[in-house]
Amino acid sequence: MRTKDVVWRAIVASGPRFKHMRTDGDQVVVSFDEIGKGLAIGHGKKLRHFAIAGSDRKFVWANAVLRGNEVVLSHPKISNPQAVRYAWSNNPEDANLVNKEGMLAVPFRTDNW
């Protein structure tokens, strides 16, 4: 094979890593690096292990949905979300955000309280 015939492919070395969070009204939109061919749900039909908090700093389990290559989080009791945590526990076995290569997302938190 000649050098010019080699096709270089990006190697995905990690699961999705937190990149940025932005609020959109009463929702939080989270974006990631290391998404490979895109984000997916690893097992089950719903994303699990995402929590959000408002200004009271009390975390509740969030409703989490994939929207393209972002995750949108909300909770009916939180109108002004301030922080997000994902898989932030001693044993986050229910965490199921993956990239399409099957690698689990890296746990993260956006608060420093």
Image (cartoon, rainbow, N blue to C red):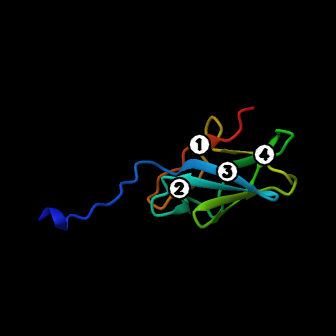
Callout count: 4
Q: Nearer the viewer, mark 2 or mark 4?
A: 4
Please give the residue where the numbered disc 4 appears in the rendered image. Answer: 82
Amino acid type shown at disc 1: Pro
Indicate which disc, 2 or 1, sits on the residue closer to the N terminus: 2
Residue 76, position as x, y percentages in the image: 85, 57
Please give the residue where the numbered disc 2 appears in the rendered image. Answer: 98
How far is disc 2 from disc 4 in space, using C-alphas?
A: 24 Å
At x 82% / y 57%, what residue is drawn?
Answer: 26
Please give the residue where the numbered disc 3 appears in the rendered image. Answer: 21
Which numbered circle lies on residue 107?
Answer: 1
How far is disc 4 from disc 3 in space, using C-alphas?
A: 10 Å
- Asked if marks 4 and 3 touch (Cβ < 8 Å), the reply is no
At x 88% / y 53%, what residue is drawn?
Answer: 77
Q: Nearer the viewer, mark 2 or mark 3?
A: 3
Indicate which disc, 1 or 4, sits on the residue closer to the N terminus: 4
Amino acid type shown at disc 4: Gln
Indicate which disc, 1 or 3, sits on the residue closer to the N terminus: 3
Query: Is 92 left or right of 3, judged from the image as shown?
Result: right
Q: Secondary structure at mark 1?
A: loop
- Asked if marks 2 and 4 touch (Cβ < 8 Å), the reply is no
How far is disc 2 from disc 1 in space, using C-alphas?
A: 11 Å
Indicate which disc, 4 or 3, sits on the residue closer to the N terminus: 3
Indicate which disc, 2 or 4, sits on the residue closer to the N terminus: 4
Indicate which disc, 2 or 3, sits on the residue closer to the N terminus: 3
